[in-house]
Image: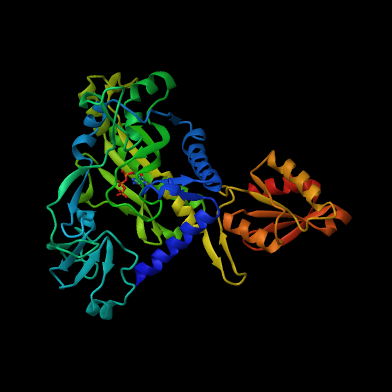
């Protein structure tokens, strides 16, 4: 039941996104291309605002971080050195009955605790509780916790949980007639140049980070930076995901905001803790409610062999707690791999000790699209009292900052409003709307997340004042029409 309610919320959010021009399904007129999305007029502004804030906070405002922008297509050896050719796999299973393909950890399986005998079913990452379990603990106990049951402790007694793999079944038809799991590489391949033989095969990058590592030498030789320092990058990444869904949460083409922070190896723990903290606070700064954010440090077994620590920032999405960003202490693994594979000396000269060292790296890897889903889900509010849906977006993120509306279409009101609009537009994203009832126009802006409204009415004709309306409180105050830009700028600061 929890699952249905949750999906209903996602449906409401995705239909608002479509209705207001935030996000459309890619190639919709041809029936759509699964798990790819297009950002419409409002979506593109929201996305730009998210990326600008990240760039401002992680690159521009810091003296220890520089930016870069690498190619999506890179030498195939990059992905051999990074381990992606060998290891970037998901276990894939085919249902022989209905031909559904699913990730091995996404099928139906049974979780059994050897200590307290708790026994429940997980379907497609969602918990399905057995009746007696429901009776005991209440239906909502684990409703918010998808996906973490494999290899985990018993959610009831903390004892040892095991997954009864024999009972793995197709998440669609329930059949147990399945192929064995085979490894499926998530990188998209394409061909470089005119010939289509395997010598010309290249990959669409599955992450932006490698573009930073392979440019390590170029950056330290040109940017005149000293350890510790970071290199940040925002760009597209591609993964041929097996299990997709949950709107833009997991898509096959998405954007990442990644920063690799290079440090002396002995300082990596300190900087890891620093960045976990910084990045957690960054989402709060975006206006995301603290109770919907948490940090999830990875268990030892979850860590890649080279990583010393990894923590996910998670958001409580309508479908459960899920990863928004990962922060990892990757030690010297990435540079070491490229040193080995390229034969180049990717290292840093330490003047104090007169030695060359390979720095360790602390990585912060965030998804643009997941951040957008987070701020949208967090902002979505059904205001029953006023019968409206509001996106309570942080004004800094809102695609349109102010709507300028003539109350009625006569007495010169549209002209006055148009003049104000032209004035304001020089300073911020504004929208002029003269069609339909004022109530309906306000509702449209509430759904778009526009924090302010300026209305020209009959009193404007008398005393030159307009109303300034606040999206969340609905409070309206009168201000002189010549002060609109100044008043809005103050509010936005
Ligand atoms: P997941 O476990 O959800 O597949 P991951 O651990 O593979 O994610 P990373 O490789 O750490 O993800 O990527 C860093 C970030 O990039 C993620 O935290 C997420 O915000 C974003 N990201 C990764 N894969 C996708 C995807 N398919 N769609 C949208 N964003 C993604």
Residue 317 appears at what percent x and percent y?
40, 59
Residue 213 appears at what percent x and percent y?
32, 29
Q: Please, which colouring scheme is shown?
A: rainbow
Along the viewing direction, whichever of 30 and 393 lies nearer the viewer = 30
Q: Is residue 1 above or below residue 348?
A: below
Res 209 quadrant in image: top left
Along the viewing direction, whichever of 375 and 306 lies nearer the viewer = 375
Q: Residue at x 13, y 60 (%)?
A: 177
Q: Left or right of 462: which side holds 252?
A: left
Q: Left or right of 295: which side holds 470?
A: right
Q: Left or right of 42: which side holds 452?
A: right
Q: Residue at x 44, y 30 (%)?
A: 67
Res 382 quadrant in image: bottom right
Q: Is residue 9 visible to the viewer in this orientation of the structure?
A: yes
Seen as rendered, the residue at the extreme right is 462
**Quarter that holds the N terminus:** bottom left
Q: Residue at x 59, y 50 (%)?
A: 395
């Amino acid at each position: 039941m929890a699952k249905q309610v949750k999906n209903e919320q996602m449906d409401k959010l995705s239909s608002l996104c479509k209705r207001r021009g935030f996000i459309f399904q890619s190639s919709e007129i041809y029936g759509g291309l699964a798990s790819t999305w297009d950002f419409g007029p409002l979506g593109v502004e929201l996305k730009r605002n998210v990326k600008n804030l990240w760039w401002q906070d992680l690159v521009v405002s810091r003296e220890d971080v520089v930016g870069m922008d690498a190619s999506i297509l890179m030498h195939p050896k990059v992905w051999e050195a990074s381990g992606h050719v060998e290891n970037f796999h998901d276990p894939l299973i085919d249902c022989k009955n209905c031909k559904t393909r699913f990730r091995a950890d996404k099928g139906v399986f049974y979780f059994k605790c050897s200590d307290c005998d708790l026994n429940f079913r997980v379907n497609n990452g969602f918990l399905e509780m057995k009746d007696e379990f429901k009776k005991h603990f209440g239906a909502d106990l684990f409703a918010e916790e998808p996906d973490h049951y494999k290899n985990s402790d018993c959610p009831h007694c903390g004892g040892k949980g095991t997954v009864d793999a024999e009972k793995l079944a197709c998440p669609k038809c329930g059949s147990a007639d399945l192929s064995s799991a085979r490894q499926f590489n998530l990188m998209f391949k394409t061909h470089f140049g005119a010939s289509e033989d395997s010598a010309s095969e290249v990959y669409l990058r599955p992450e932006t980070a490698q573009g930073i590592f392979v440019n390590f030498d170029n950056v330290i030789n040109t940017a005149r930076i000293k350890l510790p320092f970071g290199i940040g990058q925002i760009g597209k990444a591609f993964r041929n995901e097996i299990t997709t869904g949950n709107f833009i949460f997991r898509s096959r083409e998405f954007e990442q905001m990644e920063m690799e922070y290079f440090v002396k190896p002995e300082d990596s723990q300190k900087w890891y803790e620093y960045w976990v903290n910084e990045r957690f606070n960054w989402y709060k700064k975006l206006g995301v409610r603290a109770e919907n954010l948490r940090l999830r440090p990875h268990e030892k077994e979850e860590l890649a062999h080279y990583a010393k620590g990894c923590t996910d920032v998670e958001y409580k999405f309508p479908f459960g707690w899920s990863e928004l960003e990962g922060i990892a202490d990757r030690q010297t693994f990435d540079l070491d791999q490229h040193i080995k594979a390229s034969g180049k000396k990717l290292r840093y000269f330490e003047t104090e000790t007169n030695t060359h060292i390979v720095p360790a790296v602390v990585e912060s890897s965030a998804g643009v699209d997941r951040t957008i889903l987070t701020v949208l889900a967090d902002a979505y509010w059904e205001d029953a009292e006023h019968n409206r849906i509001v996106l309570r977006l942080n004004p800094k993120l809102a695609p349109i900052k102010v709507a300028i509306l003539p109350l009625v279409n006569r007495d010169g009101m549209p002209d006055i409003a148009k003049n104000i609009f032209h004035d304001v537009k020089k300073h911020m994203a504004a929208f002029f709307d003269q069609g339909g009832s004022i109530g309906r126009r306000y509702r449209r802006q509430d759904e778009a997340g526009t924090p302010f409204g300026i209305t020209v009415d009959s009193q404007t004709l008398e005393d030159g004042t307009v109303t300034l309306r606040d999206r969340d409180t609905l409070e309206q105050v009168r201000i002189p029409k010549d002060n609109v830009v100044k008043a809005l700028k103050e509010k936005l600061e």
